[in-house]
Image (cartoon, rainbow, N blue to C red):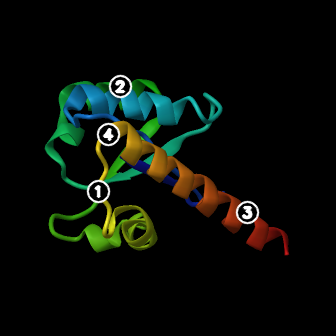
């Protein structure tokens, strides 16, 4: 799962072997912990069924997280979608990872590179 902070131009990945609602909720809690509790977060989501669970909605209401769904078949409206082109090329294309951990490390290495590169561009 990936999170994009539009204001900071920072991309984060949350890795889990499964993507049931329990893992999605864990990822959302992890993402929430990166911001001050007083700050409202607007989380743009696709219509992936675990996002729609009552447990997710309840947690979001209690934690100042507004869930915003893109219309069905309109994932292109989500600003994070264009961020996947580069990692698909550098992390996934022509690759064969023996373990989930190997792939996770490759993604983490890419995210570190991408975020450092983008923060350097903002300074100049």
The residue identified by callout 1 is 96
Whether pointer 3 and pointer 1 mark residues with C-beta atoms closer than 8 Å, the reply is no
In the image, 69 versus 86, the foreground residue is 86
Residue for point 85% across, 75% down: 124
The residue identified by callout 4 is 100
Q: Secondary structure at mark 3?
A: helix
Identify the mark nearer the N-term, 2 or 1: 2
Identify the mark nearer the N-term, 2 or 3: 2
Residue for point 57% across, 60% down: 6
Expressed as whole percent of the image width and height from the top left, the position of residue 119 reads 73, 63
Q: CA distance from mark 2 to mark 1?
A: 37 Å
Marks 1, 4: nearer the viewer? 1
The residue identified by callout 3 is 119
Whether pointer 2 and pointer 3 mark residues with C-beta atoms closer than 8 Å, the reply is no
Q: CA distance from mark 3 to mark 1?
A: 30 Å
Q: Secondary structure at mark 2?
A: helix
């Amino acid at each position: 799962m990936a999170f994009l902070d539009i204001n900071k131009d920072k991309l984060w990945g949350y890795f889990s072997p499964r993507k049931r609602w329990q893992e999605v909720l864990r990822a959302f809690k992890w993402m929430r912990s990166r911001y001050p509790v007083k700050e409202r977060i607007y989380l743009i989501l696709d219509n992936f069924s675990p996002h729609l669970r009552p447990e997710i909605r309840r947690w979001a209401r209690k934690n100042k997280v507004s869930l915003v769904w893109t219309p069905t078949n309109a994932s292109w409206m989500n600003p994070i979608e264009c961020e996947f082109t580069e990692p698909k090329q550098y992390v996934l294309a022509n690759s064969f990872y023996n373990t989930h951990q190997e792939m996770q490390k490759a993604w983490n290495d890419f995210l570190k590179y991408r975020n450092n590169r983008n923060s350097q561009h903002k300074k100049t």
